[in-house]
Image (spheres, helix red, strand yellow):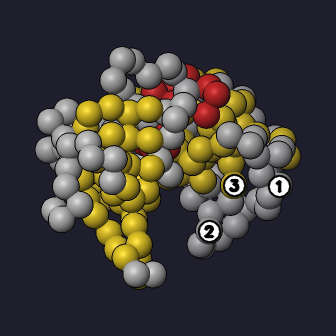
Amino acid sequence: MIAGLEPAELPADAVEVGRIGDAWGVKGWFKVLSFSAQPEALFSSKRWFLLPSERGARTFEGAAKLAIKESKEHSDTVVACAHEVLDRDAAQALRGARVFVPRSSFPTAGLDEYYWVDLIGLDVRNRQGEPMGQVRELLSTGAQTVLVLEYSVEGETQERMIPFVAVFIDSVDLPGRCIHVDWQSDY
């Protein structure tokens, strides 16, 4: 374990939100490669949980908790510093670590705003009540976000994409775990 990192259990509601990149400066700051263009979850949580990189050098094992002192946007990236990371060498030792934040610490989404993590796994039905599939992932195409659905035809897994825009999305029922769409099964 890296000096100062506290071993911890990954929370049950942990969501991977980024990875630690290089050290930034000499006072223990580090760059974070956020998985979101709007990294509010990183900024709202003062407790990050780390898992070692899946590939490359591993400087620690198991889950660790990192107490964040400050995180902010800088140019086109996120930079952060933690109480336990005091110099460039310590920041460099975190390189590649996967960053998780408890879902419970995400800021509340606004009206008609959704976190991608909340949409994954939802069933999708069209206006006729036909099942369209289940959300496997979301893609950002620049112009819009696209739902990638997975469904089965005669035992064979198929994929369907539906733009996540108001003209095609009638409603999102998070408690009911369903998205209702204006889309035909033969599209």
Q: Position of residue 128 (x, y in %)?
A: 27, 47
Which residue is pictured at 69% across the width and 55% down the height?
A: 51
Considering the numbered disc 2 on the image, is that residue within a helix, a strand or a loop? loop
Which residue is pictured at 83% across the width and 55% down the height?
A: 1
Question: Residue beneath label 2, please?
Answer: 54
Which residue is pictured at 61% across the width and 34% down the height?
A: 103
Q: Identity of the amino acid at label 1?
A: Met
Question: Residue beneath label 1, please?
Answer: 1
Q: Position of residue 149 (x, y in %)?
A: 36, 59
Of the 4 image quadrants, the one containing the C terminus is bottom left
Q: Mark 2 or mark 1: which is in front?
A: 2
Q: Residues within 10 Å of mark 1 (few under 14, many from 20)?
A: few
How much space separates mark 1 and mark 3, taking CA atoms? 11 Å
Question: Residue beneath label 3, please?
Answer: 51
Which disc, if any, is residue 16? none
- Residue 159, relative to residue 108: is it above or below? below
Q: Identity of the amino acid at label 3?
A: Leu
Q: Is residue 129 left or right of residue 66?
A: left
Q: Position of residue 29 (x, y in %)?
A: 56, 37
Q: Mark 1 or mark 3: which is in front?
A: 3
Q: Position of residue 31 (x, y in %)?
A: 48, 43
Q: Residue 35 versus residue 127: which sits nearer the camera?
A: 127
How much space separates mark 2 and mark 1, taking CA atoms? 16 Å
Q: Residue 92 versus residue 32: which sits nearer the camera?
A: 32
